[in-house]
Image (cartoon, rainbow, N blue to C red):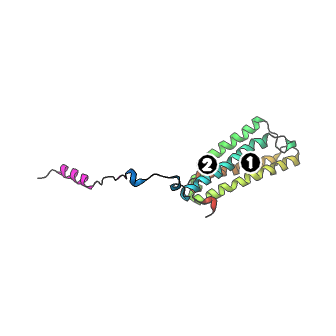
Amino acid sequence: PSDPLKDTKETATASVIPAVTPTEDEAGPVSLRTILIPRVLYPILNYGFVALIDQAATVLVPLMYSTSLDLGGLGFDPFTIGLVQGVGGFAGGVTQIFTFPYLHRRFGTKRLYVCAYVMYFVIFASFPLNSFVTRRAGRVGAATWVLIVMQWTAYVVSYMSWGECFLVERAMFWI
């Protein structure tokens, strides 16, 4: 009688296909041109645009908040600026954890990315609107705080563009 263990080893060894690795002559050198394809370029461009616009908004928030009322800002002290940014950042993080997976499943990658990216327009439109409302009132009032909350809500939604940046291939180009 034959040994079943020996038959199993022979069958397993016979079915393994050896890996073929191309030699250096067959593969050729990899050039930069081979990776500059739309599938690689679009996510890089998306990431670049999101990084640029997000950094612009991140820089303008403390600048706007700390500038005096006479010059068009809100005249907040450093503690208030830190408090607003800290609460906004914490709320954004918690919101992302619980809403991003649901919204991604519900709307899909491209729709969520475009919606999140559009929120940057709301953020930037809030700066002159906030200045106008505050100057007109002569102080930071309830309307100013409503606009600040609206701005931070848009900023929280815009965070989702970071999560979608590499998942969407052509969102910035509407193709």
Residue at mark 1 to residue at mark 2: CA–CA distance: 17 Å
Kindly state the secondary structure of the residue where label 1 is placed.
Answer: helix
| Residue at x 23% of width, y 54% of height | 11
* Quadrant in which the C terminus is drawn: bottom right
Identity, as a three-letter code, of the amino acid under mark 1: Val
**Residue most extreme to the front:** 25
Q: Which mark is residue 96?
A: 2
Residue 49 location (% of width, % of height):
65, 52
Residue 85 location (% of width, % of height):
71, 41
Dot 2 alpha-carbon crowd within 10 angstroms: few under 14, some 14 to 19, many 20 or more: some
Left or right: residue 126 versus residue 138 is: left
Earlier along the polypeptide chain: callout 1 or callout 2?
2
Residue 111 location (% of width, % of height):
62, 60
Q: Which residues are magenta?
A: 1-22
Depth check: give the residue in front, 142 or 117: 117
Depth check: give the residue in front, 101 or 10: 10
Kindly state the secondary structure of the residue where label 2 is placed.
Answer: helix
Identity, as a three-letter code, of the amino acid under mark 2: Gln
Left or right: residue 18 versus residue 80 is: left
**Residue most extreme to the left:** 1
| Residue at x 59% of width, y 52% of height | 44
Q: Which residue is mark 1?
A: 149
Q: Is residue 52 magenta?
A: no
